[in-house]
Image (tube, grey):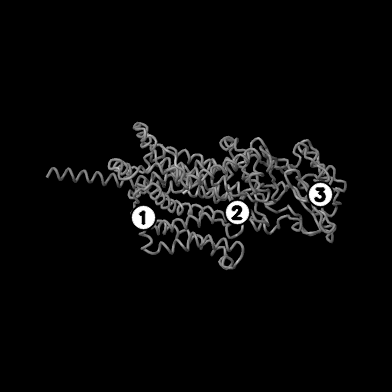
């Protein structure tokens, strides 16, 4: 296979190069040298994005597995494998990200030895470790099928019900607990984002994002790998997303209403601007878009609506973890470029690994026939060569 | 009996000997440059602040219900029965949740170390266990920082306010804040002016309760939710089985006919 330098490959190499440089600074000069974190801002971009958003963006795994295996929604069967792949990669990469953020990452195993059950962080840690293991077994059949190992697949199929239930239980726990992490800071976090409802809001947004992410990645894969797009599946997901967005929006409204903040949130202020941005992106724009049947039936409309809601919920979690503390601290936190570059490196690695997995593993099983047909008729060059090049798409 | 510190700002002369004794006790560098620093940091656990010729000391409050200890995933921080909130560095994984959770923003971090530690006043636990006062209390020339039994110090603080109501603001900072602390502050000026969080803002509820309310539900939630999920799985798949069996039966009947 000849290596061609395409635009996206150059971008990928640049991101990886800068990321490795930042990794060097991190592990040879310390957290202070690589980041703008400080005693005032002990948690920065890596917690706000890599942890909070990373775990949220990987929620598609449990949403789709739940829909298909728990509720038996057979129509969504074709997106189970990509959703599980995204979730598995997401969690593995999130753990990699955590190794950057922890001050003493080599002691990460202490979580399993010196347990403090009162700590939300402990619960998140144990759930994430266990759920990553569950995802590994949910993902494993892809690899086993590739090498035609039928017996272990049979074993996994036998316990699949247990994996499904365990996976959803663990996801419910840690997706909501990410919100509970912030319950400990009532005097620090701005009231726009500090609410006793945080665990519910985080769980709710994980479901909406899980659906949006599945729409996004299906469309993206279709574009990148020349796959045939299964519109009925996307339409179904789009409808579910609209419902999930409404539920989330109502939860938010109820929360502000009960805490008597409705008057405050419409008054212009530093925090209000960020809140408006978040609400526009997460709710107003995608709900308006998806309310039109024409949009709900068009692949591009669904794609755009899902991107808006993804950006909206990412903004929400960054507001909870960063914006909401700025008034308390009294100054702004802007991540250093090396912090961005580590995060970008992890995202780029995620795209590349996703591409490689799609290339070598039966992630889109029904596509196998399509590929066979293609190689038979030679109508199109093998799509797979483009895979690495689209890393970072 | 648990020990505590009483800091009386009206008796403080701003000599900063507590700062230097603290540095010595914790094997930290201390010179004129460090003395001039007016913020707490990983190399300065306590600081004497000056405002309008009046002084104020800041240090870890050693909460009765410390947030830092409750949030630590590996239990590296804990409250001893003698009063100090101490730190076991060998357990720490460096997640810095303690720093985020502390209402008094006391834990500081060795940001430039490759094996960083959380640093804060640990109330000289070795000395306290040995029955000695903390280094800062021992050196204080005016008795502004006083070490003793927690209950005795509360009584003494109340007496001082009663005897000199014109000197003191009528409150003991740390008595009820976040459920009570092991450091009490008497002053003629509001402690908030020196960066302490306002009592109204942090409240009297022990901080760990905010997450505890959620965490305590988890042991009940797990079996209930597992059963519910298992039930849904069974129902939705049972329906499938029944449908398959019915189809088979129909086919059989059809062929029999």
Q: Secondary structure at mark 2?
A: helix
Q: Chain of mark 1?
A: A
Which sits earlier in the primary sequence, circle 1 or circle 2?
Answer: 1
Q: What residue is drawn where x is 13% and y is 43%? A: B256
Q: CA distance from mark 1 to mark 2?
A: 35 Å
Picture coordinates of residue B17, whole percent (x, y): 84, 45
For residue B159, say whether it is visible. Answer: no
Q: Quadrant of residue A153?
A: top left
Q: Depth check: A147 or A323 in front?
A: A147
- Determine the chain carrying the residue at label 3: B
Counting other residues with Cα less than 10 Å from the Cα at mark 1, is it few (<14), some (14-19), or many (20 or more)? Answer: some
Question: What residue lies at 56% left-to-right and 54% top-to-bottom?
Answer: A318
| Residue that numbered label 2 is attached to | A322
Q: Is residue A352 left or right of residue B185?
A: left
**Residue A113 in view of the camera:** yes
Alpha carbon separation for disc pair 1 and 3 = 65 Å
Q: Are marks 3 and 2 in contact (CB under 8 Å)?
A: no
- Image position, residue B148 (x, y; %): 79, 44
The reply to the same-chain question for discs 3 and 2 is no
Disc 3 secondary structure class: helix
Between residues B117 and A8, which one lies in front from this camera angle? A8
Helix, strand or loop under label 1: helix
Residue wearing tag 1: A236
Q: Residues within 10 Å of mark 2 (few under 14, many from 20)?
A: many
Which residue is the site of mark 3?
A: B36
Q: Is residue A289 above or below residue A24?
A: below
Q: Are marks 1 and 3 in contact (CB under 8 Å)?
A: no
The chain holding disc 2 is A
Q: CA distance from mark 3 to mark 2?
A: 31 Å
């Amino acid at each position: 296979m000849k290596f061609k330098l395409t635009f996206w490959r150059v971008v990928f190499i640049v991101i990886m190069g800068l990321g490795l440089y930042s990794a060097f600074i991190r592990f040879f000069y310390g957290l202070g040298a690589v980041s703008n974190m400080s005693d005032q801002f002990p948690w920065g971009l890596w917690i706000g994005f890599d942890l909070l958003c990373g775990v949220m963006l990987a929620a598609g795994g449990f949403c789709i597995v739940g829909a298909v295996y728990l509720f038996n929604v057979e129509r969504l069967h074709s997106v189970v494998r990509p959703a599980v792949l995204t979730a598995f990669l997401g969690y593995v990469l999130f753990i990699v990200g955590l190794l950057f953020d922890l001050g003493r990452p080599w002691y990460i195993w202490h979580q399993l030895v010196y347990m403090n059950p009162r700590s939300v962080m402990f619960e998140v840690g144990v759930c994430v470790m266990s759920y990553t293991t569950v995802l590994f077994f949910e993902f494993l059949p892809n690899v086993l099928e590739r090498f035609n190992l039928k017996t272990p697949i049979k074993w996994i199929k036998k316990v699949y019900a247990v994996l499904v239930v365990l996976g959803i239980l663990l996801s419910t726990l840690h997706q909501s607990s990410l919100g509970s992490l912030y319950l400990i800071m009532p005097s620090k976090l701005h009231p726009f984002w500090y609410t006793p409802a945080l665990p519910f809001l985080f769980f709710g947004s994980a479901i909406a994002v899980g659906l949006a992410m599945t729409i996004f990645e299906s469309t993206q894969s279709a574009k990148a790998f020349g796959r045939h797009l299964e519109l009925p599946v996307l339409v179904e997901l789009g409808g579910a997303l609209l419902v999930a967005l409404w539920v989330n929006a109502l939860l938010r409204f109820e929360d502000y209403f009960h805490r008597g903040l409705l008057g405050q949130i419409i008054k212009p202020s530093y925090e209000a601007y960020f809140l408006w941005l978040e609400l526009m992106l997460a709710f107003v724009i995608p709900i308006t878009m998806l309310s039109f049947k024409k949009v709900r039936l068009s692949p591009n409309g669904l794609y755009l609506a899902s991107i808006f809601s993804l950006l909206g919920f990412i903004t929400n979690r960054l507001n909870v973890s960063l914006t909401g503390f700025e008034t308390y601290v009294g100054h702004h936190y802007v991540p250093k470029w090396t912090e961005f570059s580590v995060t970008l490196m992890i995202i780029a690695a995620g795209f590349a690994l996703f591409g490689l997995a799609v290339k070598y593993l039966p992630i889109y099983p029904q596509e196998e026939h399509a590929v066979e047909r293609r190689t038979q008729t030679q109508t199109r060059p093998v799509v797979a060569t483009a895979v690495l090049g689209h890393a970072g798409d | 009996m648990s020990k505590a510190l009483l800091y009386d700002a009206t008796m403080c002369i701003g000599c900063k000997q507590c700062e230097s004794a603290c540095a010595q006790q914790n094997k930290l560098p201390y010179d004129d440059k460090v003395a001039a620093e007016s913020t707490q940091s990983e190399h300065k656990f306590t600081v004497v602040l000056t405002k309008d010729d009046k002084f104020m000391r800041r240090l870890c409050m050693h909460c009765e219900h410390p947030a830092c200890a409750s949030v630590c995933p590996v239990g590296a921080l804990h409250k001893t029965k003698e009063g100090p909130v101490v730190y076991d560095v060998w357990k720490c994984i460096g997640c810095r949740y303690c720093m985020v959770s502390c209402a008094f923003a006391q834990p500081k971090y060795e940001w430039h170390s490759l094996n960083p530690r959380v640093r804060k006043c640990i109330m000289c636990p070795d000395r306290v266990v040995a029955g000695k006062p903390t280094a800062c209390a021992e050196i204080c020339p005016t008795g502004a920082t006083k070490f003793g039994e927690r209950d005795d110090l509360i009584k003494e603080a109340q007496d001082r306010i009663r005897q000199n109501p014109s000197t003191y603001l009528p409150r003991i900072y740390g008595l009820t804040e976040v459920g009570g602390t092991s450091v009490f502050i008497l002053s003629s000026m509001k402690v908030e002016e020196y960066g302490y969080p306002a009592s109204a803002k942090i409240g009297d509820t022990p901080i760990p309760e905010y997450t505890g309310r959620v965490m305590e539900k988890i042991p009940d939630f797990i079996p209930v939710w597992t059963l519910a999920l298992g039930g849904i799985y069974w129902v939705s798949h049972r329906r499938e089985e029944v449908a398959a069996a019915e189809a088979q039966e129909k086919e059989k009947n059809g062929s029999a006919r």
